[in-house]
Image: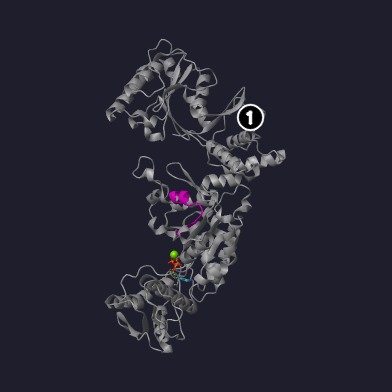
């Protein structure tokens, strides 16, 4: 059960406040309690037990003649309880035992006089605690409220002892329920981690018990607290009142979903880092990412971005339009302008890219290339294969299992990844395969740049780039689309762009009925072209080079491929490139890697090799090797090929064709070369 957040606040002055941030001045802020605190106050009229969960470790506003104060929960409750006629508010927690709540008056013991209670500042056994609860709430005059803080962590010597504890309390409160007066005025308040932490039988259907979820602070409370922090930390002395107000509003807006305690932590960071009011967003970023570094503002990034086009084109073949559009969107991301049209309240991700197009044409590859460009490390690409998230229940893999379910404490993969590496690229591959509920989760990420997990922890995506890939609008084999539109390899880029974009819109709007998603990604759709024969050939060359390079680095063996052999191999690998680069890679494996591996395995040594022919017969392809010393230009050479360590360098003739570029030194060879 939760307190309603939408209800207007009940104000002691009877004045209705707008939901906009007020000025934060005391005179302008009548006594205003958050809605959940109103619920709490109202519940005291009839409930003997009130269970509080949610945002229970924060600070909360309450006002009295001294002005607005921000106090911890038990002290705030103390104020409300005192107003409801309670004499003493006694707090117990399993670490420190009993203490009176600080409620603005001297710690009173009214109502406790004459009782033989062990109220020392130390934990007591559960039976002793039950004695106190029964004694204190049973007959005290004036009534005494008992706040059991950390009630989730009350543990007895055995499960039976805990059970007995609740049975005694339940029995006693039910036997008292006849006496209306007692019942109303001696409440027990349970502060728990999760609503389900007390035994079900005790909570469910108990009409003397009220559950209340303590909400996160509303905008007006955040604003008032920002104002308080400004006073406490002496900020903004060089700003005009209007500038100060605007900066405070920005602070309050950007802290949506944060606790007031987090705002105070941000204020401390700002002071430590010498950041004044105008630079609070930097302190917020440091608080959320845990890092002072801002890779988005690093000079290294700017240097790399200058060569962005060259870097991306070197890796992604035959996709000039996709690269162009990606660069446009990246420019906005790097300048921090994504989402800037929505005003100062943008905590949206740095950028969003929606890569659509045929299969195997470089969408995932470009996402990885972009990651490397931005963060210098492909590992900063956090990839989620959405085909693994087709079931509604799989949402818990991303945001964690609900409380009480196995694995709850582990949290969710996506949220954990965002905590671990806030500066990264989140790649959601094949987004159309995800269950629609998972797509709803993306709305929050795209809109607010954050996601709350099942444990209530918030992960931020404001420093991340979000990339979706999809085949929407392009059926495999490239003839018709799943929307009935036909896209053809012969289509111009404009035609393809129009058809695919229409299909993406149609998919989200009509099929999924999630038009909001289209409006979030609409401007960021990057359409990839089919591969042309020329780009297929370039991809073939790039993959083959990678293979040769890997062999050289792993085993120290350099492999040259003669021109004819290479041409034959190319024909075998790219004759049908409609399945994209992945198909080319697969065929390189069939026609080159497999026969080569067989040969390397059977050979005794790791000396260099020269492939002079490729013979494909039905299911098997055989490589024909020639003399590595042969001086035949048509047979390939080792020109410029570096060796791995442990490999004797033999001078070679330089032929006219080459394949592999020297790269980093090889790790250990897996077999020793003969001396
Ligand atoms: N345009 C390209 N330039 C260079 N390599 C490419 C290109 N397209 C595909 N490849 C190669 O093909 C492999 C598969 O490409 P990639 O994973 O990027 O396909 P995709 O477009 O994401 O396809 P899918 O929609 O099926 O996921 C890559 O690892 C890469 O080696
Ligand atoms: Mg892909």
Counting from the top left corner in percent of width and height, residue 122 is at 39, 23
| Picture layout, residue 425 above or below residue 275 | below
Q: Residue at x 61, y 37 (%)?
A: 226
Question: Furthest residue to the right?
Answer: 240
> In the rendered view of the protein, which quadrant contains the N terminus?
top left
How many neighbours does mark 1 have within 10 angstroms: few (below 14), some (14-19), or many (20 or more)?
Answer: some
Say whether residue 141 is visible.
yes
| Picture layout, residue 539 above or below residue 444 | below
Q: For residue 143, which quarter of the picture?
A: top left
Local SS, label 1 = loop
User: In the image, ligand 2 is in what quadrant?
Assistant: bottom left
Q: Nearer the viewer, residue 61 or 277?
A: 277
Counting from the top left corner in percent of width and height, residue 424 is at 50, 55
Q: Nearer the viewer, residue 308 or 443?
A: 308
Q: For residue 298, which quarter of the picture?
A: bottom right
Which region is colored magenta? 415-428
Q: Nearer the viewer, residue 346 or 652?
A: 652
Q: Is residue 423 magenta?
A: yes
For the image, the number of numbered tags is 1
Say whether residue 483 is visible.
no
In the image: residue 48, left or right of residue 27: left
Counting from the top left corner in percent of width and height, residue 396 is at 39, 48
Q: Is residue 619 magenta?
A: no
Question: Furthest residue to the front?
Answer: 675
Read off the residue under disc 1.
29
> In the rendered view of the protein, which quadrant contains the C terminus?
bottom left
Q: Residue at x 65, y 38 (%)?
A: 235
Q: Residue at x 69, y 38 (%)?
A: 237
In the image: residue 542, left or right of residue 347: left
């Amino acid at each position: 059960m939760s307190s309603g957040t939408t209800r207007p606040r009940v104000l002691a002055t009877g004045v209705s406040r707008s939901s906009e941030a007020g000025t934060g001045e005391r005179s302008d802020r009548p006594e205003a309690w958050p809605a959940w605190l109103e619920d709490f106050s109202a519940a005291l009229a009839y409930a003997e037990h009130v269970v509080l969960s949610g945002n229970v470790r924060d600070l909360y506003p309450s006002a009295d003649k001294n002005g607005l104060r921000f106090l911890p929960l038990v002290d705030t409750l103390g104020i409300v309880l005192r107003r409801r006629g309670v004499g003493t508010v006694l707090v117990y927690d399993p670490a420190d035992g009993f203490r009176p709540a600080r409620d603005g008056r001297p710690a009173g013991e009214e109502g406790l006089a004459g009782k033989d209670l062990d109220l020392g500042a130390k934990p007591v056994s559960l039976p002793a605690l039950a004695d106190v609860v029964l004694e204190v709430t049973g007959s005290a005059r004036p009534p005494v409220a008992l706040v059991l803080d950390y009630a989730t962590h009350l543990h007895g010597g055995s499960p039976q002892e805990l059970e007995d504890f609740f049975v005694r309390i339940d029995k006693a409160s039910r036997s008292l329920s006849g006496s209306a007066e007692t019942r109303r005025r001696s409440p027990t308040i349970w502060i728990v981690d999760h609503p389900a932490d007390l035994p079900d039988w005790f909570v469910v259907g108990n009409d003397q018990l009220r559950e209340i979820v303590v909400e996160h602070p509303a905008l007006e409370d955040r604003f008032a607290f920002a104002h308080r922090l400004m006073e406490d930390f002496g900020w903004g002395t060089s700003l005009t009142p209007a500038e100060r107000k605007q900066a405070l509003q920005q602070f309050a807006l950007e802290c949506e979903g944060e606790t007031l305690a987090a705002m105070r932590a941000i204020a401390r960071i700002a002071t430590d880092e010498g950041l004044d009011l105008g630079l609070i967003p930097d302190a917020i970023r440091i608080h959320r990412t845990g890092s002072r570094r801002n890779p988005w503002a690093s000079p290294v990034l700017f240097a790399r971005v200058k060569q962005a086009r060259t870097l991306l084109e070197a890796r992604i073949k035959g996709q000039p339009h996709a690269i162009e559009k990606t660069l446009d969107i990246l420019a906005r991301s790097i300048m921090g302008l994504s989402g800037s049209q929505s005003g100062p309240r943008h905590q949206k991700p740095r950028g969003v890219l929606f890569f659509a197009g045929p299969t195997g044409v470089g969408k995932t590859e470009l996402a990885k290339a972009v990651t490397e460009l931005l963060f210098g490390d492909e590992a900063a690409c956090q990839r989620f294969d959405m085909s693994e998230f087709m079931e509604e229940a799989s949402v818990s893999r991303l945001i964690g299992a609900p409380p009480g379910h196995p694995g709850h404490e582990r949290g969710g993969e996506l949220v954990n990844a965002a905590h671990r590496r806030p500066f990264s690229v989140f790649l959601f591959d094949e987004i159309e395969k995800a269950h629609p509920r998972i797509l709803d989760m993306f709305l929050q990420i795209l809109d607010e740049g954050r996601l709350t997990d099942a444990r209530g922890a918030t992960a931020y995506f404001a420093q991340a780039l979000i990339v979706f890939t999809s085949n929407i609008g392009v059926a495999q084999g490239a003839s018709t689309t799943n929307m009935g539109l036909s896209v053809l390899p012969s289509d111009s880029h404009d035609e393809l762009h129009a058809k695919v974009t229409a299909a993406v819109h149609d998919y989200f709007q009509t099929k999924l009925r999630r038009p909001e998603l289209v409006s979030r990604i609409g401007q960021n759709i990057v359409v990839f072209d089919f591969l042309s024969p020329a780009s297929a050939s370039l991809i073939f060359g790039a993959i083959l080079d990678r293979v040769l390079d890997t062999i050289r680095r792993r085993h120290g063996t350099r492999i040259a491929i003669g021109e004819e052999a290479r041409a034959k191999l190319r024909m075998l690998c790219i004759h049908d490139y409609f399945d994209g680069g992945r198909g080319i890679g697969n065929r390189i494996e069939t026609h080159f890697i497999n026969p080569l591996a067989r040969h390397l395995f059977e050979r005794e040594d790791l000396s260099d090799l020269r492939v002079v022919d490729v013979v494909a017969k039905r299911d098997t392809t055989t490589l024909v090797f020639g003399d590595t010393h042969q001086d035949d230009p048509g047979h390939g050479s080792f020109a410029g090929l570096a060796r791995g360590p442990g490999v004797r360098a033999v001078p070679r003739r330089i032929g006219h064709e080459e394949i592999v570029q020297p790269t980093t030194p090889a790790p250990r060879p897996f077999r020793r070369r003969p001396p």
